[in-house]
Image: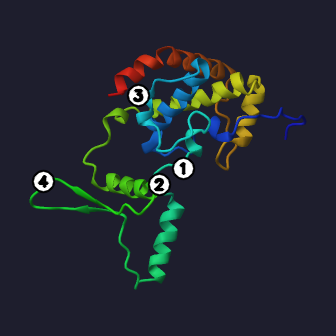
Amino acid sequence: MPDHQLPEVSLQDNEWDFSGCPVDELFECWVYEFAREYHRRHGSIPEAWRIWFPFGADFPQTPYLSVSRAAPSKEDVKLVSEWLDKHPEAIVTPPVSIVETKSQPGLCLKIDWQFSDTVLLKWMRLILKEKRPRPPAQGKGRPKEREADLIRLGAFRLVKIANLNISQATEYSASHKKGAIEIPLYADQAEWSKASANVERIMAGFSDEMEKLTP
């Protein structure tokens, strides 16, 4: 155990620890968090970038992992399943369902508009996961790279925004990172410096990258 007190860190854990991001949301998290960094530096972002943000996100104040996103949690699914097991007599009509018709090729959605946008988006996401014939093009082949970029961004924020030195950031990330095993973002001091340099490189070309990605 360390015999000293670490400085108080004002950053929420979701500002620098992205280990809880689902693999299929790495691209959206990458866009959102680097857009927040862009906004921090420039005071605004092009409105077109918001097409990639979660619905209703309080940008730039709220970190991606703190936004109420469309995907239901495993706990949500478990609770619903348990409730249905106990109430087999209930007639449950999903707020969003698929209707296949002979007159219209492809899939049509039947939407019950009495439900909130949050609920409808949860169901739409489940349908997309079930029916999408192939992964989205923007994330194909790059999840490991996006994940590595987010780890670098987390390290950058601990050092540059929370103003921890590298030794403090190493210790702090080990003790506050998600998971039972205390592992820092980086164990080697040189890796922390390289992470910050990589974030600066990404930011230098971020606007051009977004121009390619945004329709």
The residue at 47%/65% (across/down) is 77
Which class describes the residues within 10 Å of circle 4: few (<14), some (14-19), or many (20+)?
A: few
Q: In the rendered structure, which disc, 1 or 2, sits on the residue that comes first in sequence?
A: 1
Question: Given the image, on which type of amino acid does mark 1 rest?
Answer: Ser
Secondary structure beneath label 1: loop
Residue 8's spot in the image, x, y percent? 82, 34
Q: In the rendered structure, which disc, 2 or 3, sits on the residue that comes first in sequence?
A: 3
Which class describes the residues within 10 Å of circle 2: few (<14), some (14-19), or many (20+)?
A: some
> Farthest residue in the front direction?
114
The mark lying in front, picked from 2 and 4, is: 2
Secondary structure beneath label 4: loop
The reply to whether dot 1 and dot 4 touch (C-beta < 8 Å) is no
Q: In the rendered structure, which disc, 1 or 4, sits on the residue that comes first in sequence?
A: 1
Residue 179, compared with residue 77, is above or below; it is above
Question: Given the image, on which type of amino acid does mark 4 rest?
Answer: Pro
Q: In the rendered structure, which disc, 3 or 1, sits on the residue that comes first in sequence?
A: 3
Mark 1 vs mark 2, CA separation in Å:
8 Å
Which color scheme does this rendered protein use? rainbow
In the picture, the quarter occupied by the N terminus is top right
Q: Please name whichever residue, 112 or 190, is drawn nearer the observer in this view of the structure.
A: 112
For disc 1, the marked residue is 68
Mark 4 vs mark 3, CA separation in Å:
31 Å
For disc 2, the marked residue is 118
For disc 3, the marked residue is 48
Secondary structure beneath label 2: helix
Mark 3 vs mark 1, CA separation in Å:
21 Å
Secondary structure beneath label 3: helix
The mark lying in front, picked from 4 and 3, is: 3
